[in-house]
Image (tube, rainbow, N blue to C red):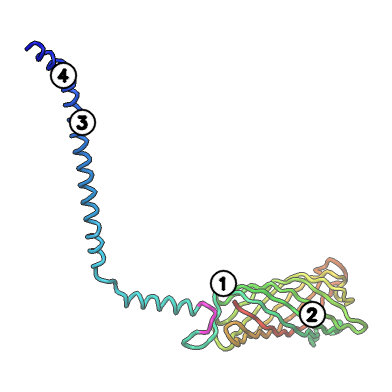
């Protein structure tokens, strides 16, 4: 009996440790079980929610299609392409264009300019424009001018900035007015100029003829003035008329 009591006494601490481990395992097991049950419920509910969402009635597709059609029509009107309803070419904000052409300059036959040097000239030019609005356009112009002086042929070139205002944003013929200024260099021996460096002022009216969506003809007539702004003498000024015809590629 004494030896049996000693064995039971000796195993007492192990029994207490086993009981402690069992309680810990039970506690953590309940947490793990709860987590697994929650995960299972979430996985089970997601397909049901998705199925419920897919079973909702469709939106008003007719209204969406009508709104999309209106957006497409507005984009068509602002695209610079012919309007499908009227077949007319339309200008748009942000549209750009490249224009190349030539022109002929001539003395203006008015009393104020009597006695001025009569030197006709030819010009070749490149213009690069961008529309600020559907009617207002800024252009950067690079001209090359050939003066037909009585004794020799002389040349000139420069850069100009031109503001062009159209009076319509579309149509078979689009009228406009423009005004520009820039600098000009020439070796022409014209007594009204007084030197090689000149300022250029010009302004006039014109017509744009849309041929197709990426091709326009542009006809202008304008007043063309060269002078040195009093930097040198004389500074009478060279005043001519100028007619130009250009081929434009809008994009």
Judging depth in this view, the residue of 122 and 26 nearest the camera is 26
Closer to the eye: label 1 or 3: 3
Contact, CB < 8 Å: mark 1 with mark 3? no
| Residue 21 x %, y % | 20, 28
Which is nearer the eye, 235 or 47? 47
Earlier residue among tags 4 and 3: 4
Q: Closer to the camera: disc 4 or disc 3?
A: 4
> Which residue lies most toward the right here?
151
- SS state under label 4: loop
Earlier along the polypeptide chain: callout 4 or callout 1?
A: 4
Q: Which residue is mark 3?
A: 24
| Residue 46: image location, x then y, percent | 25, 57
Quarter of the image where the N terminus is located: top left
| Residue at image location 72% in from the left, 82% down from the top | 101
The residue pinned by badge 4 equals 11
The reply to whether callout 2 and callout 1 are in contact (CB within 8 Å) is no
Please identify the quarter of the rendering in which residue 110 is found: bottom right
- Report the residue marked by disc 2: 239
- Does label 4 or label 2 sit earlier along the sequence? 4
How far across and how far down the image is residue 149, in percent? 88, 82
Which secondary structure, mark 3? helix
Q: CA distance from mark 4 to mark 2?
A: 125 Å
Question: What residue is shown at x 18% (from left), y 30% (from top)?
Answer: 22
Relative image position of residue 7 (x, y in whole percent) = 13, 16
Cα separation, mark 3 vs mark 2, equals 106 Å
Q: Earlier in the sequence, mark 3 or mark 2?
A: 3
Query: CA separation, marks 1 and 3?
Result: 75 Å
Q: Which residue is disc 1 drawn over?
A: 94
Which of label 4 and label 2 is nearer to you? 4
User: Could you tell whether 131 is left or right of 2 in the image?
Assistant: right
């Amino acid at each position: 009996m004494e030896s049996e009591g000693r064995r039971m006494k000796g195993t007492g601490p192990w029994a207490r440790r086993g009981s402690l481990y069992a309680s810990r395992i039970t506690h953590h097991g309940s947490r793990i079980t709860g987590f697994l049950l929650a995960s299972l419920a979430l996985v089970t509910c997601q397909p049901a929610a998705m199925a419920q969402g897919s079973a909702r009635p469709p939106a008003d597709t007719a209204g969406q299609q009508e709104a999309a059609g209106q957006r497409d029509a507005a984009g068509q009107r602002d695209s610079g392409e012919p309007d499908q309803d009227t077949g007319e070419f339309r200008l748009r904000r942000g549209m750009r264009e490249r224009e190349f052409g030539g022109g002929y300059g001539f003395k203006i036959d008015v009393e104020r300019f009597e006695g001025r040097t009569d030197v006709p000239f030819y010009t070749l030019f490149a213009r690069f424009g961008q529309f600020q609005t559907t009617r207002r356009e800024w252009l950067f112009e690079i001209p090359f001018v050939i003066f037909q002086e009585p004794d020799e042929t002389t040349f000139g070139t420069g850069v100009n900035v031109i503001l062009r205002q159209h009076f319509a944003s579309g149509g078979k013929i689009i009228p406009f007015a423009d005004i520009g200024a820039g600098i000009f260099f020439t070796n022409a021996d014209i007594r009204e100029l007084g030197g090689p460096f000149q300022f250029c002022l010009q302004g006039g009216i014109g017509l744009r003829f849309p041929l197709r969506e990426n091709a326009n003809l542009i006809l202008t007539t304008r007043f063309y003035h060269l002078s040195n702004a009093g930097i040198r003498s004389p500074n009478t000024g060279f005043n001519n008329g100028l007619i130009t015809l250009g081929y434009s590629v809008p994009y």
